[in-house]
Image (spheres, rainbow, N blue to C red):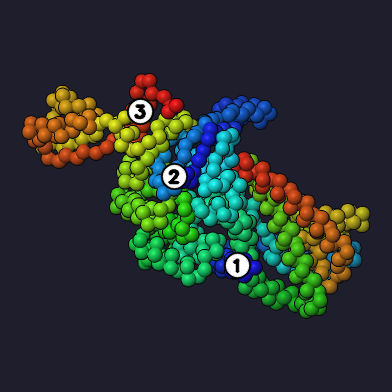
């Protein structure tokens, strides 16, 4: 059953325009010029209950604007949106009890108090009984492995601990739909992995629907089976992640370190040489050729270290939009 | 009802803990609120000339009562609201099923509790310095004072919260309140008791919200007659006016809100 439905969802921001310099300021003071910026245009998609969907797109593509409309933070300019059967922008209590938003670059916990104080506020806000509250804090803090930090002021926590506490606060009322905007932003590799693992466990255990935006490919590939690629406010791709990679990024990145510097010319026959810095080189190789290329390199060069990875999402996206003839899905 | 009491108790408890973290800052604010005592010195000196119909000790009590009223009704919600809009943290509040104002109201009420010990200490200090002004108000006057102070706080909070809504359109909503504060400064009785104003002006001012924020509660504590049949309707009318304005601005503001920085 569809939990989220949008049809021709559009958001246009009206932004003031001002020429630089004092003359521009003066002119702007007397004659204010505004410009309409289309952030999202005719967005149509459906998300089923329990799905984990990744929103992809370059900065300014309209991902966060879409999330804001789905949560009811901003009003759509036109089009329709239904989340859990509600019009989000009406912010009805029953709707708000069903959702939660986590923003990697924002915090809801009170900075100078222990996280437990903010959790107590959330408990009464969502009408949780004391016993339910304690039970949920114990359960979620164990999953997140943060039982020991809940009594410390939030300002004293590391970024990773803070993000985990933010997740606990956002999930205390067990929302059916979770919106995650860059939840692993700025975290180290271990903290990122822990957050991903927790989100996967939460989705499996409670069947929650999750919508995620992230710049980290690892977040998307670890959590999302389906991705929606948004660019210039419209959907360019909607389907399985594997389909996106095959369609738009049929290559992988090989990072190799040699015992001694190797000339760029000697590497070019293996694929696109992205960078050569001393003994290190980055190559872009077609997915189907990766095994052969690695075998040949190991055979022909004194390789010290070698890693194979997917290129960063930004890189994939850059290539998608650089491909000729690509346009949004009909 | 039970749920609301629990909600309010939790909010007040948590925000009280939060305010205690900032106690030294609160004490500095409270100290900055001794402005009425400075004016008291000026007016006592002026009263010695016998031109104003009030004894110096009466001026002292009036400005002391103004000080107490100010301490109990100080409001800064516009600065808090502006910050939450600009930083985008309002988004979290909007997504919770309780009125957004509850957080701001809780922080104000808890701050009052945190400020209380310092306020009492300053009161003691005042009467040690100026023992002639000491008096014990009649319990009925204290009751009137408390009712009027509560109404004054409510009205001041509502007006400033309404002005806060401008933060949806401008990044400097607080500057509008600074303009409002100018009127408040001169017309509320902070600079001078309204009794020394010309009769016509005083009558006119009693139809504005300003005297009810300082002058009326202060006079009630001093034992002055409270014209309840005027006080209550005027406060109710201004309250209704600003409530209506707040609802309009809130609804339109939310349509304009873009969740900045979020």
Q: Residue at x 49, y 34 (%)?
A: A44
**Tag nearer the camera, 2 or 3:** 2
Q: Based on the displayed image, in which of its 4 quarters is residue B220 positioned?
A: bottom right
Disc 2, SS: strand
Residues tagged by mark 3 and mark 1 found on one chain of the structure: no
Residues tagged by mark 2 and mark 3 found on one chain of the structure: yes
Q: Which residue is mark 2?
A: A48
Side (left or right) of B32 relative to A217: right
Side (left or right) of A292 relative to A253: left
Placement of the C terminus of chain A among the 4 image quadrants: top left
The residue lying toward the viewer, choosing from A234 and A280, is A234
Q: Which mark is residue B3?
A: 1
Crowding near the residue tagged with mark 3, few <14, some 14–19, many ≥20 C-alpha atoms within 10 Å: some
Q: Are marks 2 and 3 in contact (CB under 8 Å)?
A: no
Disc 3, SS: helix
User: Which subunit holds the residue at mark 3?
Assistant: A
| Cα separation between marks 1 and 2 | 34 Å
Disc 1, SS: helix
Q: Which mark is residue A231?
A: none
Q: Residue at x 90, y 66 (%)?
A: B53
Q: Residue at x 44, y 32 (%)?
A: A235
Q: Based on the displayed image, in which of its 4 quarters is residue A27 positioned?
A: top right
Q: Are marks 1 and 2 in contact (CB under 8 Å)?
A: no
The residue lying toward the viewer, choosing from B215 and B47, is B215
Residue A17 image offset from top left, x and y in percent: 58, 29
Q: Which mark is residue A320?
A: 3
Residue A24 image offset from top left, x and y in percent: 60, 27
Q: Residue at x 71, y 49 (%)?
A: B246
- Where B142 sits versus A263, above or below? below
């Amino acid at each position: 059953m569809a939990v989220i439905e949008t049809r021709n969802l559009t958001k246009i921001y009206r932004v003031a325009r001002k020429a630089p310099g004092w003359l521009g300021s003066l002119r702007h003071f007397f004659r204010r010029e505004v410009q309409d910026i289309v952030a999202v245009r005719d967005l149509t998609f459906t998300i089923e209950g329990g799905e984990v969907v990744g929103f992809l797109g370059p900065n300014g593509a309209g991902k966060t604007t879409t999330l804001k409309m789905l949560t009811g933070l901003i009003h759509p300019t036109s089009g329709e949106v239904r989340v859990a059967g509600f019009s989000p922008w009406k912010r009805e209590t029953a709707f708000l009890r069903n959702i939660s938003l986590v923003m990697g670059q924002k915090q809801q916990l009170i900075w100078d108090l222990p996280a437990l104080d903010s959790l107590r506020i959330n408990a009464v806000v969502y009408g949780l009984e004391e016993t339910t509250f304690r039970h949920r804090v114990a359960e979620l803090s164990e999953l997140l492995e943060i039982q020991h930090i809940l009594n410390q002021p939030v300002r004293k926590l590391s970024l990773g601990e803070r993000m985990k506490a933010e997740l606990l606060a956002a999930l205390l009322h067990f929302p059916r739909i979770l919106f995650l905007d860059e939840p692993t932003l700025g975290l180290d590799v271990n903290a990122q992995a822990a957050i991903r693992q927790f989100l996967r466990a939460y989705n499996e255990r409670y069947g929650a629907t999750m919508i995620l935006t992230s710049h980290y490919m690892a977040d998307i590939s670890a959590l999302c089976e389906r991705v929606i690629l948004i660019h210039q406010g419209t959907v360019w791709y909607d389907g399985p992640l594997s389909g996106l990679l095959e369609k738009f990024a049929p290559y992988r990145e090989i990072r190799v370190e040699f015992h001694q510097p190797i000339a760029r010319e000697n590497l070019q026959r293996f694929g696109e040489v992205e960078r050569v810095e001393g003994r290190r080189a980055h190559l872009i190789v077609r997915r189907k050729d990766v095994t052969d290329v690695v075998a040949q390199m190991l055979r022909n060069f004194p390789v010290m270290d070698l890693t194979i990875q997917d290129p960063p999402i930004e890189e994939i996206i850059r290539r998608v939009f650089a491909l000729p003839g690509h346009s949004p899905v009909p | 009802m039970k749920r609301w009491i629990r909600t309010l108790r939790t909010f007040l408890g948590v925000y009280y803990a939060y305010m205690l973290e900032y106690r030294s800052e609160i004490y500095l604010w409270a100290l900055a609120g001794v402005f009425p005592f400075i004016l008291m010195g000026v007016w006592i000196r002026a009263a010695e000339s016998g031109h104003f119909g009030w004894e110096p000790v009466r001026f002292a009590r009036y400005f002391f009562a103004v000080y107490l009223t100010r301490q109990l009704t100080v409001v800064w919600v516009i600065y808090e609201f502006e910050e939450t809009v600009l930083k985008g943290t309002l988004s979290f509040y909007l997504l919770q099923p309780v009125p957004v104002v509850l957080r701001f109201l809780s922080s104000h009420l808890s701050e009052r509790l945190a400020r209380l010990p310092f306020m009492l200490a300053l009161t003691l200090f005042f009467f040690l310095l100026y023992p002639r002004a000491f008096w014990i108000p009649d319990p009925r006057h204290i009751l009137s004072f408390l009712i009027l102070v509560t109404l004054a706080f409510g009205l001041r909070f509502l007006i400033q919260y309404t002005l806060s809504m401008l933060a949806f359109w401008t990044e400097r909503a607080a500057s509008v309140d600074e303009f409002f504060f100018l009127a408040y400064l001169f017309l509320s009785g902070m600079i001078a008791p309204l009794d020394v104003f010309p009769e016509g002006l005083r009558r006119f001012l009693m139809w504005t919200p300003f005297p009810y924020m300082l002058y009326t509660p202060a006079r009630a504590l001093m034992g002055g007659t409270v014209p309840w049949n005027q006080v209550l309707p005027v406060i109710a009318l201004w309250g209704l006016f600003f409530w209506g304005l707040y609802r309009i601005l809130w609804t339109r503001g939310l349509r304009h809100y873009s969740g900045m920085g979020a």
